[in-house]
């Protein structure tokens, strides 16, 4: 997985998030003045010399791209954001553009791998999103609008990418998470995956829903009960046992128990990549408040097998 994106899932990620905690109001004013020569140069490039005709909104987008690029380079060099107040901005910006282009190549490689290896399991939104990411690479302008995401990306991840940083870093993070999610799905029998998804909703393929979330929930639930993750089937009795098991623990220990179940499941499923384990662990922790809402809440968390299947599931375990 790309090194910059193997992080604590659910928190801001990537180089910009690591660059620093921001500037004071006085420092912000000082930086705005320092950025003006770069903005003027970018306006000249955009308008081919007629910068006087640019709308305020367009100039603001160019300025946002400059800052995005500079912060990428600050992170690449291990510099805090306030280094922009003292360093040579022209040199830093030129290096930053090369860094953004390198990240773009990383994202393209990951996209190429997604086209080859990601399975859609009949999800139209996932198939459309894979095409939409191709549109991003066709239209992305790393030199003038590095912070924008000109592509249609609507497939829902279990753990969504934070809004910031945007641009190619967001797309790289999205693709990383998509590969992680699909990696778990591909360890399972496709027939069982589809059966589980249809239990969640008969027409899941037409909906904007995560394929990973219900599969991961059942995997973690079965692991908490001791195994059988590959079956992807949880009976009502098992759902009740999971609630009883978690409710018997102090509130601070419940999420940790689910996290350990995720790690145990990862070992049994031979998910050896650290990012895959971290992702499943984060998804497992997020299940706790939903499961503890009521004794029957497990029915909204797990894809529970019909009562007629309960005996067969118990026997299989």
Image (cartoon, rainbow, N blue to C red):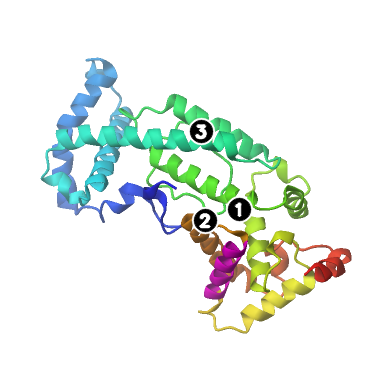
Q: Which residue is mark 3?
A: 112
Instruction: Answer with mark 2 or mark 3, whichever residue precedes in sequence.
Output: 3
Q: What is the distance, in whole Å, between disc 1 and disc 3 at their CAs?
A: 19 Å
**Real-space CA distance between mark 1 and mark 2, rounded to the nearest whole angstrom:** 8 Å
Q: Main secondary structure of the magenta part?
A: helix
Horizontal placement of 228 versus 43: left or right? right
Figure check: 287 above or below 203? below
SS for dot 1: helix
Q: Residues within 10 Å of mark 2 (few under 14, many from 20)?
A: many
Among the 4 quarters of the image, the one containing residue 249: bottom right
Assess disc 3: are there few (<14), some (14-19) or many (≥20) residues with their C-alpha within 10 Å of its C-alpha: few
Alpha carbon distance from label 2 to label 3? 20 Å
- Quarter assignment of residue 128: top right
* Residue 267 covered by magenta stretch: yes
Mark 2 sits on what residue? 276
x and y percent of residue 131 in the render? 57, 30
Residue 301 placement, left or right of 313: left
Is residue 129 visible to us here? no
User: Mark number for residue 98?
Assistant: none
Determine contact: label 1, label 2, CB under 8 Å.
yes
Q: Going 62% across and 55% down the picture, which residue do you hit?
A: 213
Residue 170 shown left or right of residue 246 in the figure: left
The residues colored magenta run 255-268
Decide: is 77 above or below 141.
below
Question: What's the mark number on residue 184?
Answer: 1
Give how far across and how far down residue 251 sits, in percent.
54, 80
* Sequence-earlier tag: 1 or 2: 1
Q: Is residue 83 above or below residue 237?
A: above
- Is 9 rendered above or below residue 131? below
Image label count? 3
Specify which label sits upstream in the sequence, 1 or 3: 3
Q: Secondary structure at mark 2?
A: helix
């Amino acid at each position: 997985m790309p090194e910059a994106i193997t992080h604590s899932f659910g928190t801001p990620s990537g180089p910009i998030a690591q660059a620093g905690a921001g500037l004071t109001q006085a420092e912000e004013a000082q930086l705005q003045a320092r950025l003006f020569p770069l903005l003027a140069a970018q306006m000249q490039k955009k308008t081919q010399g007629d910068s006087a005709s640019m709308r305020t909104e367009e100039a603001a987008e160019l300025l946002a791209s400059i800052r995005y690029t500079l912060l990428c380079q600050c992170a690449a060099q291990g510099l805090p954001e306030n280094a922009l107040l003292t360093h040579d901005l022209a040199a830093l910006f030129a290096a930053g553009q090369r860094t953004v282009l390198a990240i773009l190549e990383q994202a393209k490689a990951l996209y190429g791998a997604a086209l080859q290896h990601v399975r859609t399991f009949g999800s139209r939104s996932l198939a459309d999103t894979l095409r939409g990411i191709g549109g991003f690479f066709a239209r992305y302008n790393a030199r003038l609008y590095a912070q924008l995401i000109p592509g249609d990306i609507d497939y829902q991840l279990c753990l969504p990418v934070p809004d910031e940083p945007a641009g190619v870093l967001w797309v790289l993070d999205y693709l990383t998470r998509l590969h992680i999610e699909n990696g778990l799905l591909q360890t399972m029998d496709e027939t069982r995956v589809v059966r589980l998804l249809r239990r969640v909703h008969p027409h899941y393929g037409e909906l904007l829903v995560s394929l990973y979330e219900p599969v991961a929930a059942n995997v973690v639930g079965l692991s908490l009960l001791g195994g059988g993750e590959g079956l992807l089937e949880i009976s009502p009795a098992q759902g009740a046992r999971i609630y009883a098991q978690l409710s018997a623990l102090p509130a601070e220990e419940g999420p940790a128990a689910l996290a350990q179940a995720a790690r145990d499941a990862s070992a049994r499923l031979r998910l050896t990549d650290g990012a895959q384990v971290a992702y499943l662990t984060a998804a497992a922790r997020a299940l706790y408040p939903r499961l503890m809402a009521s004794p029957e809440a497990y029915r909204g968390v797990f894809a529970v097998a019909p009562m007629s299947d309960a005996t067969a599931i118990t026997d299989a375990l």
